[in-house]
Image (cartoon, rainbow, N blue to C red):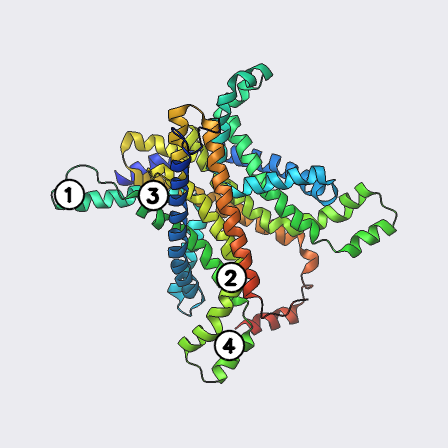
Amino acid sequence: MFDLVGFGVGGWGAALLKAALTTFALSVAGFLSGAVLGALAAFARLSGDRFARGAAFAYSALFRGVPDLLTIYLLYFGGSVALTVVGGWFGARGFIGLPAFATGVVALAVISGAYQAEVYRGAFLAIHRGELDAARAYGMSGPTMLRRIVAPQVLRYAIPGLGNVWQLVLKDSALVSVIGLVELMREAQVGAGSTRQPFVFFCSAAALYLAIAIITGSLFRHVERRSLRGVRTA
Amino acid sequence: MEMAFLADVFMQLMRGVPLTLQLAGTSVALGLVMALILAITLQSGPPLVVWPIRGYVTAFRGTPLLVQIFLIYYGLGQFRPSLQALGLWGLFREPYWCAILALTLNTAAYGTEIIRGGLQSVPFGQIEAARACGMSRSLVYRRVILPIALRQALPSYGNEIILMIKGTSLTSIVTLLEITGIAQQIISQTYRAVEVFACAGAIYLTMNYIIAHLLAGLEHRLSAHLRAAPDFESSVAIEGGLH
């Protein structure tokens, strides 16, 4: 039974590990792009502009309220329909599918951005108002204040929340298998189908997901501890 | 034509709402009972019981729900002869029961952590006072610890309920015809994926909006003692201060 997912002849070990690497790359790319979206949305949410506030609120409420699977389907089919129409103008025929990896990254970015926006917003609100007043009293310009006072503290307060969002992204990446990307989940399905040993393959996939989650989780805890080394604790 | 199509899709999708609510409701209810038992056991159980529970919670929180559903629905099929011998095959053959089992085990793992956090937030003085009054262990739990812990856990548990509603959409992959499943069925007949999925998304969004509001109302009711007494002067002062 272990030969099947091992690294010997006819073993699926190498294929599964490679797929796990794809899962990891997909999640990291989605998480980082989501950080940009989330920061922009948080910025808009905290800005004085009524329209920007409303748009950012709608964005984060929408993608936290709709199932992630639907978001992925919608982006994939919506994007493909648009691409097919554009392709039609240039004489292409038939359905053009979006590249699965890129679509997966966009989907994970849009979903995790909605959650990260809330994390950054909460972190900003946790900054002591007096620090901002003090920075202004020193005559700091907006960008300088953002760089020296706001960003370092927002990142510090946001780390635990970001760790949670990262775990969410990692698990959501399994859903990208439905649009045909060969990541860990899809590779396990392929292995299960061709060997008729679904239990072995899905257990292996679960173990690999768990390993990634535990290793990256301890990384986040390490970063959190490090970020707090200048803070007095009881 | 366009509006008529959307209205027709909407009516068809609404037929999936009862199954979605049933899946989420059953698994949240069963999961809550399981989470309560596990969280209380984690507080005071012997290591031999505590370690397997911790392992279970870590495993189910650290792996995707989709993998869990596949593991139960397809994976356990590998043990069909033994399951048949145990008379359990009828259960594991049905995607409905596999989905319920997967969703329940998933939400119970998250719920255990949420309730454990709630239990830890109960001030020790309250427990000490209850003991000093001569309450038995179970009475302390029933009258003091659980009410405080559950109220504390309610906001997080509300998020978990919303996540479960969203999670039920994955059961469409094992052929259940809840909202997402019906959406896929309509798409395979009409090839109009964007409109149909957008319509399904709107239904989920509305359901989650209503549930979030009900939970916020419940939270408001349960925390009356934590709010300042309604006092005209001070409420005017607070509102004035916000602007």
First in residue order: circle 3 vs circle 1: 3
Q: In which chain is the residue bearing label 1?
A: A
Check the image and report above or below for A89 versus B95.
below
Q: Secondary structure at mark 3?
A: helix
Which three-letter amino acid code belongs to the residue tagged 2?
A: Ala
Kindly identify the residue that appears in the image at 65 percent across and 71 percent down. Answer: B234
Q: Amino acid at mark 3?
A: Leu
Mark 2 element type: helix
**Residue identifier under label 1:** A88
Q: Which residue is mark 3?
A: A74
Q: Earlier in the sequence, mark 3 or mark 4?
A: 3
Image location of residue B219, percent across then percent down? 62, 52
Is any atom of residue B168 visible in this view? no
Mark earlier in primary sequence (1, 4) = 1
Tell me whether circle 2 and circle 1 mark residues in contact (CB < 8 Å): no
**According to the image, label 4 marks what residue?**
A132
Q: Earlier in the sequence, mark 3 or mark 2?
A: 3
Q: CA distance from mark 3 to mark 4?
A: 42 Å
Of residues B6 and B56, the one nearer the viewer is B56
Question: Nearer the viewer's eye, disc 4 or disc 2?
Answer: 2
Disc number lying in front (3 or 4): 4
Q: Position of residue B166 (x, y in %)?
A: 47, 41
Amino acid type of disc 4? Leu
Marks 1 and 4 on same chain: yes
Q: Is residue A33 left or right of residue A220?
A: left
Q: Nearer the viewer, mark 3 or mark 2?
A: 2
